[in-house]
Amino acid sequence: MKHFTAIIHRGEPGEDGYWATCLEVPGANGQGESREDCLQDLAAAIRLLVEAERIVTEDGRGYVGRL
């Protein structure tokens, strides 16, 4: 299992919730009312982006790169 780094931020003053980004997967971000919700949302975004990149790189066209 690969491990990723999550940077978690609190919402702006007067706003509830959290938002997070992932250093290793550009474009992956998550948000939620709690830290746990935020991390679950981020994990789902990472899975989607990693799977999308795998499809692009393994589709036989020889393209390797980020979406």
Image (cartoon, rainbow, N blue to C red):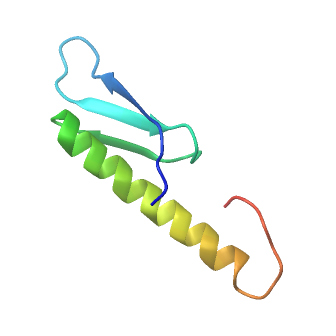
What is the quadrant of the C terminus in the image?
bottom right
- Comparing 67 with 5, the one in front is 5
Seen in the picture, residue 3 relative to 61 is either above or below; the reply is: above
Q: Nearer the viewer, residue 56 or 1?
A: 1
Total number of numbered discs in the rendering: 0
Percent across and percent down for residue 55 are 62, 78
- Above or below residue 39? Residue 34 is above
Query: Among all residues in the image, which is located at the extreme bottom?
Result: 60
Q: Residue furthest toward the front?
A: 1
Residue 52 occupies which quadrant of the picture?
bottom right
Q: Is residue 51 above or below residue 15?
A: below
Q: Nearer the viewer, residue 55 or 11?
A: 55
State the residue lying farthest toward the top.
13
Q: Which residue is rendered at x = 70% and y = 82% of the image? A: 58
On the rendered image, what quadrant is the N terminus found in?
Answer: bottom left
Is residue 37 rendered to the left or right of residue 25?
Answer: left
Foreground: 47 or 1? Answer: 1
Q: Is residue 26 left or right of residue 9?
A: right
Residue 62: give x, y in percent of width and height: 83, 79
x 71%, y 75%: residue: 57
Residue 33, image x, y percentages: 16, 36
Residue 13 lies, in percent from the top left, at 23, 11
Q: Judge left or right: residue 16 versus residue 46.
A: left
